[in-house]
Amino acid sequence: MSQLLDIAFLSGLIGATMRMATPIIFATLGEILVERAGVLNLGIEGTMLMGAMTGFLVTFSSGSLWLGVLAAAAVGMLLGLLMAFLAVHLGLSQHVSGLGITLFATGLAMFIYRLHFGSPTVPPIIHPFHQISLPLLSSIPLIGPGLFTQYSLTYYAWLLIPALSILLYKTNIGLKIRTVGENPVVADTVGVNVLLTRTLCLVVGGALMGVGGAFLTLAHQNMFLIDVVSGRGWVAIAMVIFGNWDPLKGAFGALIFGFLDGLQLRLQGLGIAVSFHIFLMIPYLLTIVALISVSRKASIPAGLLKPYRREEKGG
Amino acid sequence: MIRIRIIKRKPLPAWAKIVIPIAAIVATLILSAIPILLAGGDLWKSYFYLFYGALGTRFNLLETFVKASPLLLTGLAVAFAFRAKFWNIGAEGQLLAGALIATVLGVHMGNLPRPIVLPLIIVAGFLAGGIWAAIPGILKTKLKVDDVVSTLLLNYVMWHIMGALLFGPLQQPGSSWPRSAAIVNAARYPILLPRSRFHMGILIAFFAVFVIWFINNKTTFGYRSKAVGVNIRAAQFGGINTTSVIVWTALVSGGLAGLAGVGELCAIQYRLIMDISPGYGYTGIVIAMLGNLHPVGVLFSAIFFSVIIVGAQTMSRMTGVPTYIAEVIQGMALMVMLIFLLFMEYRLKVMKK
């Protein structure tokens, strides 16, 4: 047991927590932006997988990691645009459109991967991102090495948390987004273009989801496996609710998930036989509990799930 | 400036309900040409082998039925729930629950004869799936928890429960893989046609189509379930106990998905593995939508999907187009069907400003 209190273990656990939380933070922030504008994007799981695949493929072909990240963002934007076409412009059921996109994007990601690489016995690999130690900060005793020796994408994820908070709560654009999500009729009346706002949020949110996926194949691992995302998109959906549609709280939820995921990895590494499945179940159960308490509060964007058509204002 | 608006149209005649899904399938098949061509496949050869691979030989035709049976059950499960506007995205987890309980019983049944073991497993599998669906049903009605998200999350909870058990008490002795011991012979579905995998579960699935049709059209419960789906407030004012209707609807829905899990375990795998289902529960959603939530529609769309999945294997072998084309086609089918359904209710109007 003394190993558990070991400084190296603790530092490793902090580092793993931050790493495992990174894709969830990207995806959660993307989903918060989208849901704040009144759209539930269940295409997130498929978007992340497409991002993971595209990022890997582009990096593999070009040798440039950042080009891979950009490509993942671009493909996320395209899928966001598709979601906007179905759920915002045609006003189809957000649930079913999103699931459709996840199914489609999941199939497409595996299809394109197979097309490009065939079925090799050893999966192709890339040279992944290196972790960067921030000067001074990373030499803080105990927590420094874990917190501040990370991939650059992780640092960006952390910068995005306050950035999205400021955007949503302190800027005019954020006010418009929130109004569109809360009450599209009012937004329309005061001259905010509801459909355009929702479309843009889906596009930007999709980019974040794509980058979250790319983190998995360009930093966390150095290859693309078909189960690389394995439900992390749904975890993000859960964290949005858990975090009450707030970037800060959502990121906190992502950290909890990262912690549990990191802990089970570390414990496995020590050869301690805890079933990691039990650990990984916890975030889902926590979210269901959070759902119960959320349903009693009014924090959910009031316009969520409702397609907006001018002609049907009254209905 | 020309603007295009989407406005409500007059109700279409009844035949449109049949024509539109068929049109959606045709449109999907046409759209499938894009990924086929991208993969460098010869278009006509690909289409030919897609259908030949699913229907062309006795064995392949029977395999198409084998594949259709879980799809039919999950499709019915989703359709029955959606009809009452219980958004059950959780057929995947309910399927796993059914397979899990069938494993527990199937491994430990000892020497009991098949006529006792099989009915027991089927009932237990139905109940396991049903209860796993009734939980979000109760959460929805009693605590106002969004059913889409709760059913979705419970899929992963069940997957992890299965994982914990397969690395723990259910793990095959001596194995380091997450898999259970094989179930006893008495727990296996009989194979009905020689030199094939055509098993009893297929008949169960087809029988379920009839049962759901019967419930929907001939029973008070079916009527109430639909009333709740059309307008829950009105149903309430009309004296229907909507809570009980939703929970029972969830139970039946989950039960059907549970049966799909029993079938995969007792007729195909004979032991529980982590990837016992390649996402049948999610495909069930597409099948239910494509079948317009009607049991007979679900029957046809399940067979269509089964043709695509089975046929894609042969097509891939003969033309080099990856088998994942089947998943791409499924996703496209759902979106195309959604758009077609929209235009059953709405039409485009071009307005000049």
Image (cartoon, coloured by chain):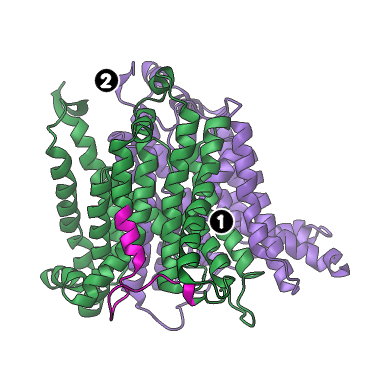
* Mark 1 chain: B
**Label 2 – label 1 distance at C-alpha:** 43 Å
Q: Residue at x 20, y 30 (%)?
A: B346
- The quadrant of the picture occupied by the N terminus of chain A is bottom right
Decide: few, some or many residues near mark 1? Use Cα within 10 Å; few <14, some 14-19, many ≥20.
many
Give, as a three-letter code, the residue at label 1. Met
The spot of residue A276 in percent (x, y) is: 66, 64
Marks 2/1 same chain: no
Q: Is residue B18 visible?
A: yes
To which quarter of the image does residue A133 belong? bottom right
Crowdedness near tag 2: few (<14), some (14–19) or many (≥20) residues, C-alpha within 10 Å = few
Residue drawn at (71%, 61%) of the image: A263
Looking at the picture, tell me which residue is in the foreground, A135 or B17: B17
Start-end of magenta stretch: B185-207
A308 left or right, relative to B129: left
Dot 2 corresponds to which residue?
A311
Q: Which amino acid lies under the numbered mark 2 shown in the image of this protein? A: Glu
Q: Nearer the viewer, residue A47 or B277?
A: B277
Q: Which residue is at a point 17% across and 26% down the rendered structure image?
A: B9
Chain B, colour shown = green
- Closer to viewer: mark 2 or mark 1: 1
| SS type, badge 2 | helix
Element type at mark 1 = helix
Q: Name the chain letter of the residue that bears numbered label 2.
A: A
- How far across and how far down the image is residue B256, in percent? 41, 52
Q: Quadrant of the C terminus of chain A?
A: top left
Is B352 inside the magenta-drawn segment? no
Residue B250 horizontal/vertical position (percent): 46, 42
Q: Quadrant of residue A39?
A: top left
Q: Is residue B205 magenta?
A: yes
Q: Residue B158's mark?
A: 1
Which color is chain A depicted in? purple
